[in-house]
Image (spheres, helix red, strand yellow):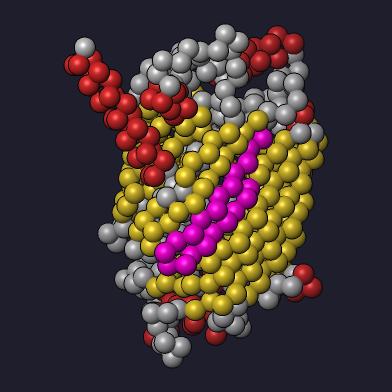
Amino acid sequence: MKKLLIQKRFKKLTGTVLILMLMAVANISRAQVTQADSAKADSLKKVAEIKKDNNTTGQYDVGDLFHDVFHPNKKPDSVKKKPSGITIIPNIASNPSIGTQIGIKAVAGKVLGSDPNTLMSVAATSASITTKNIIYFYLTHNVYTPGNKWNFQGSLVAAKTVTPDFGIGIGNAATGSPEDLILSNPTRKPYVLNAQYYAFREKVYKQIDKGLFVGAGVSFDIRRKIYDKNNADTVLTPYRIYNQRYGFQDDHYASNGLNANIQYTTRDNQNRAYRGIYVDAGIRVNQTWMGSTKNAVQLNTDFRKYFSLSEANPEHVLAFWNWTSFVVGGALPYLEIPGTARDGNFRSGRGYTTTYFKGNQYFYSELEYRFPITRNKFLSGVTFFNVQSANDDLGTKLFDVWQPGGGAGLRVLFNKATRTNLCIDYAWGKYGARGLFLGLNEAF
């Protein structure tokens, strides 16, 4: 009897430790259903595929772990409840850049209405503060109304930030002036910029055909009190050289403009797709009459394709991602130039820190294989490989140099109702770049 009691206590203790570890690492990060065919038979087949893919029977997530650890003797309700679409976790982290961080994060997902072809709406929010007085708050949403008639995408950010900087380009040494060499930063010397950051973005899409949307919106990116505490004002850094050449102030800027986009999607889930395609192409036009420091025109494309490799286990997925961004007119502020992890979700370029490579022309591609590990889907894994290229306007053109990255990762099913995963990836690149990259939901 005593031995049995000890075993129960040990199981509860180990389960509690696992939960606390998951909640802690979940927040160290920088943190749609297949369209029906017109034919009736194909429509029924698609609906069957959707129901099969969204069936959570036999799956085990962190909510189930909580129940088994803290309520092991509680019997299931007689009336089966639909799994909750909300995940709430503490936002705890610690590293030399930010100090010790504490806060809270929430992720939610829900299909609006009863149409089986309506894509899942998702939202996320987080608020945190660190011992180095870094404050970060964000709220994002991607909402599809019943029948996908309208799609609303947007985000709101207010923060005191620390942004790493490694110069312009893809790592090639410029052969012009000494300032050009500093700007291209071939040794990848790290600089750090502190600032207040405020952002608001909102786009509204109208469905014009099954899976096809057109949209428009606004984007405001504002930074204030920008400073480099490690280098005196007289020291030439890539940031200061760029500002001198393109006429920006060192301590503040605004990048405000209008957006026009076209989107096509057949993804079965926004958090973790098993099959389908996602394409978004748009133009952003920054305008001084909207408060932008300078006018600029930027083109962006986002292409994602998912192949489910098994009918019995659709979690076996080969996923491909291509993201590009081109400044075709005017000038962007230095910290808004396209580059590593400058995509909408800040997840590209695993193996390198944010903005490790950047340029007015930027091209990125990634291939990832996703596979289940346990039968109850609680654990799964990924392997991935990516490449990126950028110009520097100093002699190196787009596609002249490619920088690779890659790695592998573990997935923990946080919420089976929304396919929300905790992602733990170890990745590496060139110049000794490597590290642990963590977050909620897949990189793409």
Position of the N terminus by quadrant: top left
Q: Which is more toward the observer, 169 or 8?
A: 8
Q: Is residue 301 left or right of residue 210?
A: left
Residue at image point 44% right, 37% down: 422
Q: Is residue 275 visible?
A: no
Q: Which is more toward the observer, 249 or 61?
A: 61
Residue at image point 41% right, 32% down: 412
Predominant SS along the magenta part? strand
Q: Is residue 126 left or right of residue 265?
A: left
**Which segment is the magenta one?**
121-140
Q: In x, y percent, where is residue 386?
A: 41, 47
Q: Quadrant of residue 137?
A: bottom right
Q: Is residue 67 magenta?
A: no
How many numbered marks, from 0 up? 0
Residue at image point 63% right, 75% down: 253
Q: Is residue 172 left or right of residue 84?
A: left
Q: Is residue 61 above or below residue 143?
A: above
Q: In x, y percent, where is residue 363?
A: 51, 54
Q: Is residue 62 visible?
A: yes
Q: In x, y percent, where is residue 82?
A: 60, 19
Q: Quadrant of residue 246?
A: bottom right
Q: Is residue 52 above or below residue 427?
A: above
Residue at image point 55% right, 12% down: 77
Q: Which is more toward the observer, 39 or 207?
A: 207
**Residue at the extreme front:** 2
Q: Is residue 250 above or below residue 366?
A: below
Q: In x, y percent, where is residue 78?
A: 57, 8
**Residue at the extreme bottom:** 234
Q: Is residue 130 magenta?
A: yes
Q: Which is more toward the observer, 233 or 35?
A: 233
